[in-house]
Image (cartoon, rainbow, N blue to C red):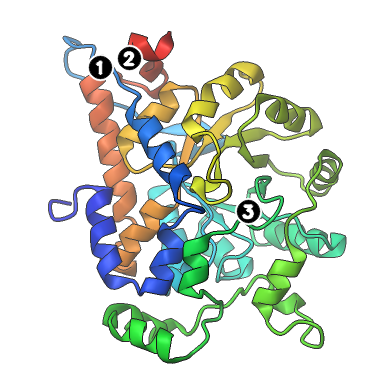
Amino acid sequence: MDHFPAIADLERRAKRRIPHFAWEYLHSGTGNDEAVARNTAALERITFVPQLLRGPFAPATETSLFGVNYSAPIGMAPIGMAGLIWPGSDLSLPRAAADRRIPFVLSTVGTQAPEIVGPLSGGMGWFQLYPPRDLELREQLIQRAAAAGFTTLVVTADVPSPSRRERQRKAQIRVPPTIGPRLVSQAALRPAWSREILRHGLPRFRTLEAYVDQATMRNTAGFVGASLGGTLSFAYLAEIRDQWDGPLVVKGILDPNDAQRCVDTGADAIQVSNHGGRQLDGAVAAIDALPAIVARLGGSVPVLFDSGVRSGLDVARAIALGASFVFCGRAFMYGVGALGNDAAGHAFDILHDDLVNVMSQTGCATLSQLPSSLSSERLE
């Protein structure tokens, strides 16, 4: 912890160990990365007033959601192409989530199959669904997630079409990677990453590759682009509700009216998110959208949050504004990129330690007390 005490320390080291093409996928937003910067700046504006002279106490971070007890309100957000960013992370991160008792969300476009990840996550596994155009494919993915032991389904709503992601285009990202001089030269500069590729093999969209018709699609990546997204509606969401028996989360909501309609359609929770700034460069900062959605829903369902979270302080900020649970993706990938798969839980340890410190400094023994420490300028 002393050598890498902050997520920013992990980020700097990870950049030196991850090849450029994979780094661009992880680190970039879209457009000029203004939404990424806006997320960070908006979180930094939220301040607390320490409440002191409380005597000795030990902050409690344990919480429950959907009847499951977690060690902290911190979860691993879905990361597409995780095995490209750091080979083997699609196995090490669910193991770390099981060990720390926090949610791990497997992406539809992850590089490991639900049948493998489900058992590894030890009851902590959630499955993220990009809505397929093919309804039979949708049903099969939902059934596979349930059979593999995933407890919660997260439907991503904020990809009505692919975003432009100019940095990723210039980096020429492919899954599986196209072996050529460009990739070889970049990988050669990152020997630790290359060793992990040799150990784990080239990343593939293992959840989806079984559905690829080689006669009509050149590769799985082509299938992904042609099959996912652009179909979600409230009627479609209602059909998913009928097919999934467990808790249902709708992720990517920024508008209070959308949030209410999702709940009316059967969602068990709303996840406020702007996709980490990766979809619309002009999108409102997710943290700025959070209070209005919390107010609109009035406690009828939990409100979850992601986008821009880089510290336990950021977790505390979101909790103070009404979030029940906070997810982050890049931070956990920085952890494995910086320190390898054996240290997959290090990012969580940083976030948790920082959250406990914030609670101590503000005089909050429980998570529910954090809103009382918000500065008055935020409450006005």
Image coords of residue 315 (percent x, y): 38, 34
The secondary structure type at the circle numbered 3 is strand
Q: Quadrant of the C terminus?
A: top left
Q: Amino acid at mark 3?
A: Gln
- Pointer 1: residues within 10 angstroms few (<14), some, or many (20+)? many
Q: Residue furthest left?
A: 2
Residue ID for mark 2: 373
Q: Is residue 140 above or below residue 198?
A: above
Image coords of residue 73 (percent x, y): 44, 36
Do tag 3 and tag 1 residues touch (Cβ < 8 Å)?
no
Image coords of residue 52 (percent x, y): 19, 11
Residue at 37% x, 38% y: name it. 40
Q: Amino acid at mark 2?
A: Ser
**Count of numbered circles on the image:** 3
Q: Residue furthest front?
A: 32
Is residue 291 visible in this depiction of the protein?
A: yes
- Pointer 3: residues within 10 angstroms few (<14), some, or many (20+)? many
Residue ID for mark 3: 128
Q: Earlier in the sequence, mark 3 or mark 1?
A: 3
Q: CA distance from mark 1 to mark 2?
A: 8 Å
Do tag 1 and tag 2 residues touch (Cβ < 8 Å)?
yes
Q: Amino acid at mark 1?
A: Gly
Q: Is residue 194 above or below residue 131?
A: below
Residue at 34% x, 68% y: name it. 341
Q: Earlier in the sequence, mark 3 or mark 2?
A: 3
The secondary structure type at the circle numbered 2 is helix
Which of the pair 39/375 is nearer the observer?
39
Q: CA distance from mark 3 to mark 2?
A: 34 Å
Q: Quadrant of residue 118?
A: bottom right
- Pointer 2: residues within 10 angstroms few (<14), some, or many (20+)? some
Residue ID for mark 1: 363
